[in-house]
Image (cartoon, coloured by chain):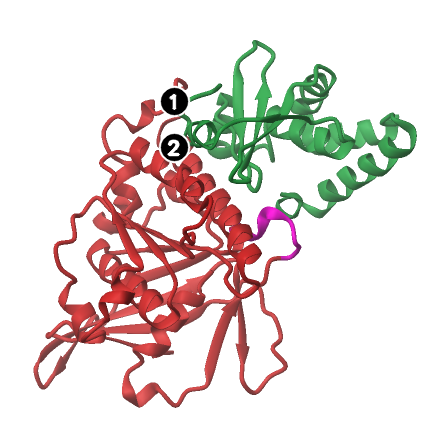
Chain colours: A green, B red
Amino acid sequence: MHSLLPTVADQLFRDIQKTYQETSQIPDDLLIALKFIFGPCALPALDLVDQHSVTCLSSPSGRKVFQVTGGSGRLYTCFVSCHYCPCPAFAHTVLRKNEGLLCKHILAVYLCQAMGVTQQDSVTDQQVSMLLSGTSTT
Amino acid sequence: MADILHVLFRSFMSRSDQTRALTASVTAPSSSTSSSSSSSSVLVLGDNSVSHSLLLLAAVTAASQLGIRVMFFTRTHIRRLPACVHKCVPSPSPESLKKIQFSYPRTVEELLQQIASLHESTSPCPAPPSLIIVDRLESFLCAPGVGSHSEFQSGEQSCAAHLSALLCDTAAFLTQVLEQRSSSAGPCRVIASFQSEGDAGQTGQESPVLDVLDRYFQVRCTLDQSGGHEAATATGRQQVWNIYLSGRGIKETTSTTDCEEKPGVTQEWQLLINPNGLMEFRAV
C-alpha cells in the first residue's frame, strides 16, 4: 500500500518505522511532519494508535483486512492493498472534495504498520468476505 | 493491466494492419507490495453495447488464447455469445468456454458479496480467476437505492470507491495466490466498463462517480465515435470507433527502441465493426 502515497509521505513512514524500532518513540520533528502532510487527521490517528485500535484480521485462505475501532467504538474495515474506508470523512474529504490523502482510520493503519503495533486476529473465510463486502462489521 | 486488451487488439487486427510492430504494455508494479493490483485494472468507458461486446470478446480471447480462468459479472443475462464474438472466434472450444464463469448479481450488494467471497473458492484447490470482468458498472452503481448502501449518506461515490477498492484488493490477493502456485500464473487483472450519463447524453461532463473510479483504475480505455463514425463498405455501413488507452498504468514500447518507459502516454487504436458483426482493430 505504500506506493499509493506521495514519495514524501512514503518516506515519512519509513523514517517513523526506523526511529520507532530504535527508540520506541516518534520524535517531535516527525510528528510535525506528520501534521504537515496529513493535516487535521494526524492527531486523531495518533490517538487511535495509542488506543491499539488497529487489528489485522486473517482468514485461512490467506486473505487479510484491517479493522479500525473508531473513537465511538464503531468498527471500520480498511483494505490491505488500496485506500478505502467506509467512514463519512473519507467519503466527504477524500472522495468528494479531494482535500485530503487519507482519513484518520487509514492513517492509523499506516502508523500501526510502521510502528509494528498492529493487533493480530484470526477469523473465518466467510467472516472476512462479509467484512470486505460491508455486510458485517464484526 | 491492459495486456489482455492488447492481446485482443492484436489478435483481431485488420489484415492491412497486421504488419505493424507496435507493442504495448503497462507499467510493472513498482514494488513487491500488495499494491500490484492497482496496476492491473482497466476501465472501459463509452457506449455500453460496444463495451459489452468488447468485454465478451476479451473474456473469450483470454480463455481460449491465454487459457486463463475468467469471472464475468453482469446484470445482462447472456444466453448466447453475440455475433461479433462468433465472427471473431468462430469455434471456441467447449473446454476454453468452461473457463469463463458468468455471474448475474442483481444489486451492488450482491456484486460486492460475490467479489468479496472469491478468495473462499481458492482454498484448497480450484485455480482462482486470472481475469475479473464487471460489465456496466453504472447498472450497479447508479441503480435506485445505491446511496443507502451504507448507513452514511455517502451515495454513489462511496459505493463506487468500495466496489473499485474491493476489485483492486481482490485482484491483489488472487495475484499472490496465482504466483504462489506458479511463478508465471499471475497477475489477476480487472476489466470493468462504465458509461456515465454524460456519455449517454453527450454533455461532455465527467460524472463524480467517474472521478472516483479513476482513483482505482490505472488504465482508461475510452471508446469514442466522434467524427466520421461510419464508413461505407461493399457490404454496408461500417462503424468506426476510436479507442484511446490512457492513464498512469500505460507505458509504450516499440520493437525498435530500448523499451523506454513513458508513463501516461496515450495509445490509440480504431475499432471497426462490420455490418455482419465482425470486429477488427487497427493501431493508429
Q: Is residue A7 left or right of residue B36?
A: right
Label 1 element class: loop
Residue at 16 percent across and 62 percent down: it is B81
Looking at the image, is mark 1 or mark 2 earlier in the sequence?
1
Q: Which residue is mark 2?
A: B159
Residue nearer the viewer, B120 or A37: B120
Q: How many marks?
A: 2
Residue at 61 percent across and 12 percent down: it is A71
Q: Amino acid at mark 1?
A: Ser
Q: Is residue A120 left or right of residue B123?
A: right
Q: Chain of mark 1?
A: B
Q: Amino acid at mark 2?
A: Cys
* The quarter of the displayed image where residue B277 is located: bottom left
Which span of residues is magenta-colored? B30-37
**Label for residue B150?**
1
Residue B119, placed above or below residue B264: above
Q: In the displayed image of the protein, which residue is found farthest to the right?
A: A23
